Image (spheres, grey):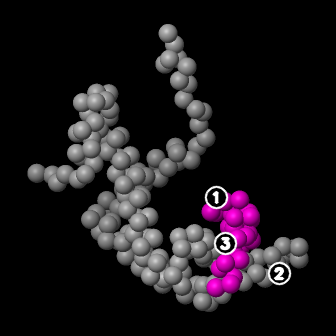
């Protein structure tokens, strides 16, 4: 018999209330939301051990992903933030010795942000611990299953990343 999780019970509770509910859609969306919450909680718990707040780690992570050097506007775009919000983060990370501002080699009006050795070491240490939970969870799948899951989620995300019009609720509420 297949094992049941919390979401199976959730779907069972809602089926009589919403007879048109697609249990597969509800199951996927609910599991994805619960998994995202789980990973966020684990990340925040582990980051405390590294004396990081989530936003600090996320900023270092974005910078590391750009080969340890980026402009503040590139980081703002990567993080989905307004540039002033990134400036405050960078100020705090610079005080901790994790980043430094350096003049751009391309445009002297521009300043680049560079990850320091201490910043890289701190980020990498946290990444190793955080990656452990990712692997712990995904080790429940065979390598081919992980690849299939990654491909399926990519297809869903390609739709999610497309702009779409708001649903037309007017037709549903005509009297």
Q: Which residue is mark 3?
A: 89
At a point 82% along the width and 81% down the height, the residue shown is 103
At a point 72% along the width and 83% down the height, the residue shown is 100
| Residue lying furthest bottom | 117
Viewer-nearest of discs 2 and 3: 3
- In the image, taking residue 56 as reference, residue 72 lies left or right, namely right
Residues at marks 1 and 2 touching, judged by CB atoms closer than 8 Å: no
Main structural element of the magenta stretch: helix, strand or loop? Answer: helix
At a point 31% along the width and 71% down the height, the residue shown is 136
Using the rendered image of the protein, determine whether residue 74 is visible from the camera's viewpoint: no
Residue 81 within the segment the image draws in magenta: yes
**N-term mark: 3 or 1:** 1
Q: Which residue is mark 1?
A: 80
Name the one closer to the observer, 145 or 58: 58
Counting labels gives: 3
**N-term mark: 1 or 2:** 1
Q: Which residue is mark 2?
A: 103
| Residue lying furthest right | 108
Viewer-nearest of discs 1 and 2: 1
| Residue 154 place in picture, x, y as percent | 47, 52
Residue span colored magenta: 70-96
Give the Cα separation between the discs numbered 2 and 3: 19 Å
| Mark 2 crowdedness (10 Å alpha carbons): few <14, some 14-19, many ≥20 | few
| Residue 91 place in picture, x, y as percent | 71, 77
| Residue 42 place in picture, x, y as percent | 39, 69
């Amino acid at each position: 018999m297949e094992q049941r999780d919390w979401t199976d019970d959730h779907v069972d509770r809602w089926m009589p209330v919403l007879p048109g509910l697609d249990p597969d859609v509800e199951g996927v969306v609910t599991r994805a939301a619960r998994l995202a919450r789980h990973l966020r909680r684990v990340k925040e718990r582990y980051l405390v051990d590294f004396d990081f707040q989530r936003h600090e780690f996320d900023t270092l992570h974005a910078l590391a992903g750009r080969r340890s050097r980026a402009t503040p506007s590139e980081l703002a775009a990567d993080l989905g933030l307004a540039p002033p919000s990134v400036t405050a983060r960078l100020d705090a990370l610079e005080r901790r010795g994790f980043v430094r501002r350096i003049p751009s080699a391309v445009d002297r009006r521009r300043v680049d942000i560079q990850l320091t050795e201490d910043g890289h070491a701190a980020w990498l240490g946290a990444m190793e611990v955080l990656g452990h939970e990712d692997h712990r969870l995904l080790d429940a799948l065979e390598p081919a299953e992980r690849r299939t899951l990654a491909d399926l989620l990519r297809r869903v995300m390609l739709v999610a990343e497309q702009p779409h019009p708001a649903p037309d609720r007017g037709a549903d509420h005509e009297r």
